Amino acid sequence: MARDLPLSNGKLLINFDSSYRVRDVFFPSVGQENHTGGQLCRTGVWVDGAFAWLDTPDWERDLNYRPESLVTEVVLRHNGLGIQITFNDAVDFDRNLFLRRATFTNLTQGTKHIRLFFHYDIHIYGLGIGDTVYYDPQTQAVIAYKGRRYFIIGGGNGDTSHISSWATGQAEMRSLEGTWRDAEDGELSGNPIAQGSIDATIGIHFDLPSLGQAKAYHWLGAGQSLDEVKLLDGLVHERGPDSFIDRTEAYWHAWINKETVDFGPLPTHLSDLYKRSILVMRTHVDSGGGIIASTDWDITGYNRDTYCYVWPRDAALCAIAFSNAGYSETAREFFRFCQRVVTRQGYFHHKYGPLGDVASSWHPFVDKYGNAQVPIQEDETGLVLYALQKHYERWRDIEFVTPLYRRIIKNGADFMVGYRHKATGLPGPSYDLWEERWGIHTFTVAAVWAGLQAAAFFTRIFNEHDASRRYLQAADEIRAAARANLYDKELNRFIRGLQINRDGSFTKDVALDSSISAVFKLGMFAAGDSAVASTMEALKLWCTTPLGGIARYEGDTYFRMGDTPQEVPGNPWLISTFWLAQYYIDKAQTSSELQPALELLQWAANHALPSGVFPEQYHPVSGVPLSVSPLIWSHAEMVLTMQRYMQKYRELDTNLRSHP
């Protein structure tokens, strides 16, 4: 189920799903240590003897954020109970505090007696073994702990700053469902302590005046010691939960508006979505600099693994989007992360954990013939250098680049120069960007070319002209080899790549694949080049359903559902759709020729979740998000597309003014 509302400060990340249930509590790194294990954490309301969990169909739900912030604005209405609730949720921008403000409105005459319940299914360190949870009389809150992880669960109403009731218990063992069941009669047991596989529920009791309003609050503090979480709880008592929620809204409003952006003719809803995409991207930036692909834990049901990793490719494109948008330090922290994790040979591993550890992989160290191979995606090496050049061109921060120069730029470029396919002169074989095929792929070739161009750019700055000439020569050879070996004259287009055979020969892979867009996207060939134009014209990957959108490649089976029409090439991907929009932008010669790109941006906006969140892909008929949501790469491509659009519009407008 999609994660509609991520909230984060770089250390504590909270995810709500589309039914407005807390599903993920990551701490102390974004994407690492999910202390709920992705299980359901429920919120429920008891009103004068009647009870409803907030995820039941009786509620009308509008899940959104406050404008230009990372504070939610969730409105729920239950006509049967005669109430409306507006929730404002926030992860404090500085402290590791998750806070929830619930404003109740009585829709009927007569005072209502309300009990609001917050439940947590606790799996500290993601295990659900050997945890302890207890009621603490000193703080009048519930505390859960194991090892170096502590969580304090507090709350209060508008008059008191402590919980009214509680229950601790065991769950997911024997026949025990959890303390959430205890809430359904409006009464919690008050059990003081539990250990093992545990959960906890707290209650906030108050009266709701006739046709009036009342507020209730809940907070969760996370720390690495008991003293730390008690200090957090004390700060909430001292300052009040409103102060933390309101200051967090103010912080993010200032952050997203730090630079004035000229959106030109773009409609307001697209400029709003641009800002929302940057904010959603920011929720997945770990305090250590890693940019996490997605924290949607439900993907574990597919392959017992997650997207909670740093893919240098995805993250490099995100870094470009951040740099262009004015968030230089966010990009710098990612490049510092890259400096810590890059191998001494100059290439990057498949992916990394938030702390820089080499992550799980399915890329073998031998090929299908039993020969040793380097299990990498070489596009990731090229794209990091390419992103670093784009960052420097925006900020000219030579002092920042200097310590990265030898380890990332020189070593990376030397690796790319040396790792070549002798028969063609192209980059050596590696895994493609979709992580499925071993060979020489057009996307990878374009990324390596762009990375070598970047290395030549930097070596010129550092007066290493011999190195610069060597990198440019390799880039020129690769570009020429791409024209000779990856452009098929009979098909009149670039192909996806080359499959390497046992004897060293190769077989052309001519499948239609949106990743071929890299030939113009990364600058190896101009969008106006006839070979690029014929290639993009040939990429017939539009989904032939009312939903539309561009498939990743023909015959894509990843998350393809059994009810998908046979003629659909694959599920529509936002990334692929944005690439087509970028092509229309790059080749436009007049402002009117930007219209197809604008229509694709509008398509993406129409299919975003109400909160503005983008998934990886959609079901081609129902439009239901598939795989993970949010996918930060989808948001990055949205931002990059709009940045490309705005830049091209300004160029065309300037030319028109200069030559009326």
Image (cartoon, rainbow, N blue to C red):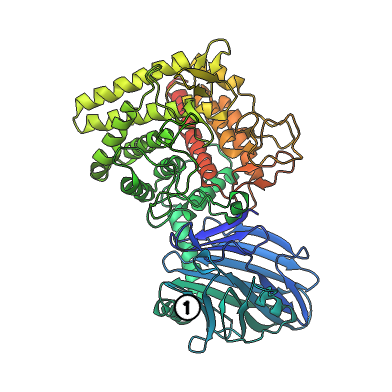
Q: Taking the image as drawn, is residue 312 in sight? A: yes
| Relative image position of residue 499 (x, y in whole percent) | 51, 23
Above or below for 178 versus 356? below
In this view, the residue in front, 272 or 636, is 636
Q: What element does badge 1 sit on? A: helix
Q: What residue lies at 49% left-to-right and 66% top-to-bottom?
A: 125
Above or below for 22 versus 256? below
Q: What residue lies at 42% left-to-right and 45% top-to-bottom?
A: 322
Above or below for 539 versus 638? above
Q: Where's the N terminus, which quadrant?
A: bottom right
Q: Taking the image as drawn, is residue 522 in sight? A: no
User: Can you tell which quarter of the image residue 404 is in?
Assistant: top left
| Relative image position of residue 222 (x, y in whole percent) | 46, 71
Q: What residue lies at 50% left-to-right and 16% top-to-bottom?
A: 487
Above or below for 286 versus 622? below
The answer to whether residue 105 is left or right of residue 237 is right
Q: What residue lies at 34% left-to-right and 29% top-to-bottom?
A: 416
| Relative image position of residue 313 (x, y in whole percent) | 44, 39
Circle 1 residue: 236
The answer to whether residue 542 is left or right of residue 47 is left
In this view, the residue in front, 260 or 507, is 507
| Residue neighbourhood size for the residue with mark 1, other residues' Cα within 10 Å, grouped as few (<14), some (14–19), many (≥20) | many
> Residue pushed farthest bottom?
137
